[in-house]
Image (cartoon, rainbow, N blue to C red):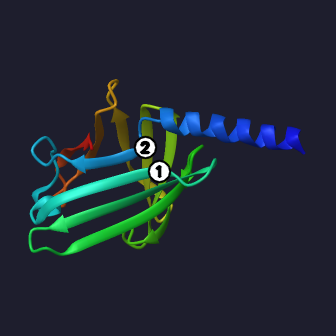
Amino acid sequence: MRRIMMLFLAVFVLAGMVWAQDPSLGKWKLNLAKSKVPPNETANTKEAVIEMRALDANTYESISTTIQKDGKTEVTKWTVPISGGIQKYQQGGPEKGISIVAAKIDPYHIVNVYLQDGKQVFLMQMNISPDGKTFTGSAKVTDPQGKPFEYLVVYDKQ
């Protein structure tokens, strides 16, 4: 019995060390001044924060809270396998027909593949700075008028 307890403790400590070393975990605040997004997406945004944490050894949970200038709060909550996979939304989420698949390349690089009705519409590359203080997401997209647009979101670690 003692051996089983020691093994459990060792696995728990190792998992904790892996989670603690994951630079994506924690609270991230959107830096509107450094971000470049279509005006209609952030015109009413006062503040946006994403908190990422490990639910267990296999699953990340993210909670995005956006506060609008009028005081209205929007919360989106999703989970994704640590090894990568489809994001499953528990609250809020993308438009009907849109799904997002996350692939973690390494602790500092994540790729989100956006699918509309099963067809890839764009890739969002997420990068964490080497010092772990900045999380950026970038993608080349087409705006509603059909013009190419480089999308950039910048989050600062809190």
> Which image quarter: residue 43?
bottom left
Residue 137, percent from left and from top: 30, 42
Residue 14, percent from left and from top: 65, 34
User: Image point 43% across, 47% down: which residue?
Assistant: 112
Would you name the residue on which mark 1 appears? 53
Residue located farthest toward the front when viewing the structure as drawn: 2
Query: Considering depth in this image, is 35 or 65 the residue closer to the camera?
Result: 65
User: Image point 27% across, 71% down: which residue?
Assistant: 74
Would you name the residue on which mark 2 appears? 25
Where is 42 relative to 36, above or below? below
Image quadrant in which the N terminus is located: top right
Where is 105 relative to 58, above or below? above
Query: Considering depth in this image, is 109 or 70 the residue closer to the camera?
Result: 70
Q: Classify mark 2: helix, strand or loop.
A: loop
User: Image point 17% across, 61% down: which residue?
Assistant: 41
Q: Does the image show residue 87?
A: no
Where is 94 relative to 51, above or below? below
Residue 113, percent from left and from top: 44, 49
Locate residue 151 relative to residue 86 in the image: left or right: left
